[in-house]
């Protein structure tokens, strides 16, 4: 499966797509990036006078690149497939400011019974670790669950 195909199969659209590029992917690992545009709505009130990217959005970027893209690669991305986040354990070390580009690397810990768990690390353009942890999710096929 090509990187282009994976990008096309992502179950997200604007303004909730947080994957700009995928640089590498195989059965064990994925690397991709996203740039937080200064005009994003989240910066209007988080925080007044000092805009900082909310941790929930950092977690979402890590999940989309480090978990979902890898899951699509591993399963072939059947039509209608999506992911449900089941657990996160993420630590934040540095703030991400408007305009910053981050790179995410996800490494598969296990993939069985439709559940994928990955070790995920986010770095900034200087190569400094911004956040890291473990994220897990279940593959959801709406046709199987009458969603």
Image (spheres, rainbow, N blue to C red):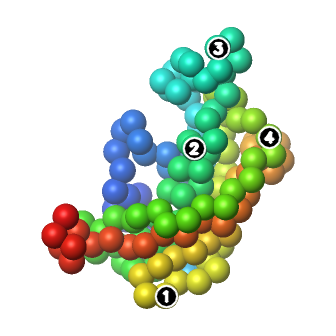
Does residue 112 lie above or below 66 as drawn?
below
- Label 1 vs 4, first from the N-terminus: 4
Above/below status of 4 relative to 140: above
Which of disc 1 and disc 3 is earlier in sequence? 3
Crowd around label 4: few <14 · some 14–19 · many ≥20 (10 Å) = few
**What distance separates the C-alpha of mark 2 from that of mark 1?**
26 Å
Depth check: give the residue in front, 23 or 33: 33
Percent coordinates x, y for residue 63 in the rendering: 54, 58
Q: Quadrant of residue 54?
A: top right
Tell me if I can see residue 32 in this picture.
no
CA distance for labels 4 and 2: 14 Å
Residue marked by disc 3 = 48
Which residue in the protein does label 1 denote?
112
Secondary structure beneath dot 4 equals: loop
Establish if 120 lies above or below 50. Answer: below
Few, some or many residues within 10 Å of mark 1 (<14, 14–19, 20+):
few
Give the image location of residue 100, x and y in percent: 67, 34
Label 1, label 4: how far apart the Cα atoms are: 33 Å
Which residue does the numbered mark 4 point to in the structure image?
94
Quadrant location of the N terminus? bottom left
């Amino acid at each position: 499966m090509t990187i282009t195909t994976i990008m096309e199969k992502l179950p997200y659209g604007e303004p909730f797509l947080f994957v700009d590029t995928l640089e590498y992917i195989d059965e064990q690992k994925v690397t991709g990036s996203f740039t937080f545009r200064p005009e994003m709505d989240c910066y209007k009130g988080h925080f007044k006078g000092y805009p900082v990217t909310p941790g929930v959005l950092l977690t979402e970027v890590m999940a989309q690149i480090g978990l979902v893209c890898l899951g699509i690669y591993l399963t072939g991305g059947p039509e209608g497939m999506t992911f449900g986040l089941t657990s996160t354990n993420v630590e934040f070390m540095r703030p991400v400011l408007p305009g910053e580009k981050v790179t995410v690397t996800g490494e598969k810990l296990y993939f069985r019974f439709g559940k994928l768990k990955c070790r995920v690390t986010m770095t900034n353009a200087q190569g400094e670790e911004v956040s890291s942890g473990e994220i897990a999710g279940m593959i959801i096929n709406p046709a199987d669950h009458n969603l």
